[in-house]
Amino acid sequence: MIIEERAYHIKGLDYIIRSAKPEDATTMSEVRLQIDGETENLDRRRGEAFLEPEAFKQLIRNDSEKETNLFLVAETANQIVGFSRCEGSPLSRLAHKVEFGVGVLRDYWGHGIGKHLLEQSISWSDATGIQKMTLNVLETNVNAIELYKKAGFEIEGVLKRDRLLADGNYYNTIVMGRFRV
């Protein structure tokens, strides 16, 4: 699905949030790789599940055509600095919901980019009649958990000892959901 572009000015940074385009594929491949190496809040370590530009191009095309998928990017000064995806299921028993995921380059944290990617995704989800958004978040990512709660997400469960991080310890994954208002 494609959404209308929106502009923001937060803490001295001008950026837009827009739907991803096939020509973003090379940059998206690089940005995701960088984000994966900057935080342990995501599922992947740097280089794991690497997507080549051609795979990103196909993903963006598919998401643009499917009514239950949304691929957004945050761009500042013609540079992609963050992204989010909502992915639905073709299965009829799961067609009422989408799973949300987000990533923002560390240098751009604190400018509301993740928040605005989330807000745009919620707005799209509600407008298209999707009944539920779900997400998984690492228990130590307290800022993200608070953001999600403010956006109407509730904790639905905990996956215990779900992730093994670089410090050698296991951490819980919090499963959250938001129902259409």
Image (tube, rainbow, N blue to C red):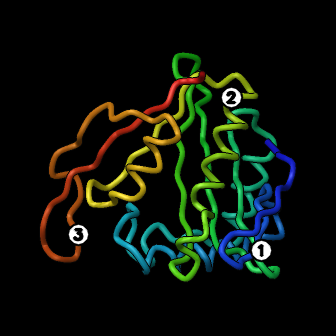
Give amino acid for label 3.
Leu
Q: Residues within 10 Å of mark 3 (few under 14, many from 20)?
A: few
Residue pointed to by mark 1: 14
Query: What whole-number distance in Å separates the C-alpha atoms at marks 2 and 1?
Result: 26 Å
- Looking at the picture, tell me which residue is in the foreground, 100 or 8: 8
Name the quadrant of the C terminus: top right
Which x, y percent locates residue 48?
Answer: 42, 71
Q: Is residue 60 above or below residue 29?
A: above
Residue 180, percent from left and from top: 59, 23
Q: Which residue is mark 3?
A: 165
Mark 2 or 3: the one toward you = 2
Of the residues under marks 3 and 1, which one precedes in the sequence? 1
Query: Residue at the front extreme?
Result: 11
Q: Is residue 171 above or below residue 88?
A: below
Q: Residue furthest left?
A: 169
Three-letter code, disc 1: Asp
Quadrant position of residue 127:
top right
x 31%, y 56%: residue: 138
Identified at 39% across, 74% down, the residue is 39
Look at discs 2 and 1 and give the one toward the viewer.
1
Residue named by callout 2: 126
